[in-house]
Image (cartoon, helix red, strand yellow):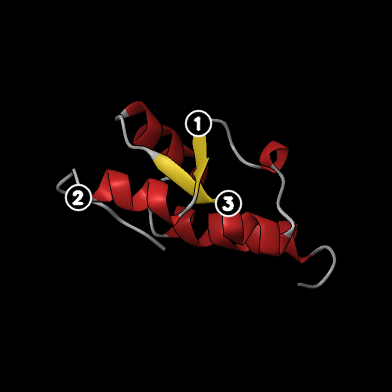
Amino acid sequence: MLPGMTGIATSMMNGWMKKANVAKLSDLLAMTIEGGARLIACQMTMDVMGIRREQLIDGIEIGGAATFFSYASNNAIALSF
């Protein structure tokens, strides 16, 4: 990642989404959480990438593969990326 590119990338994405008449990512995430979806951040990935809990948005749970698979095996829909 190049220094300062996060802001530029965010601006570009917001511009593309506005041009396509799509809600901003922050609005989509808020609607998802309000709708009852669980967002689970991978602890191992956070460790590898040096991401701290404080850097995540509110409403995100932290867990490992076991947490995700336990949830996914008991529910009809699970998305991961």
Residue 61 can be seen, yes or no: yes
Label whose residue precedes the other's in the sequence (3 or 2) = 3
At a point 39% along the width and 59% down the height, the residue shown is: 20
Q: Is residue 16 above or below residue 55?
A: below
Q: Which residue is mark 3?
A: 43
Q: Alpha-carbon distance for marks 3 and 1?
A: 15 Å
Residue at the spot of label 1: 59
> Which amino acid is tagged 1?
Gly
Q: Is residue 2 left or right of residue 25?
A: right
Q: Quadrant of the N terminus?
A: bottom right
The residue at which mark 2 appears reads as: 77
Q: Are the residues flagged by discs 3 and 2 in contact, CB closer than 8 Å?
A: no
Residue 7 drawn at (x, y percent): 73, 56
Q: Would residue 11 be visible to someone looking at this image?
A: no
Q: Measuring from the top left, give residue 13's x and y in whole percent.
A: 55, 61
Answer whether labels 2 and 1 touch (C-beta < 8 Å). Answer: no
As drawn, the residue found furthest toward the front would be 66
Circle 1 packing at 10 Å, graded few (<14), some (14-19), many (20+), is: some
Query: Are there few (<14), some (14-19), or many (20+) residues within 10 Å of tag 3?
Result: some
Count of marks overlaid on the render: 3
Compared with residue 24, is residue 60 higher up or lower down, i.e. above or below?
above
At 20% across and 50% down in the image, what residue appears? Answer: 77
Q: Residue furthest left?
A: 76
Name the quadrant of the C terminus. Answer: bottom left
Q: Secondary structure at mark 1?
A: loop
Packing grade of label 2 (10 A; few <14, some 14-19, many >=20) is few
| Label 3: element kind | helix
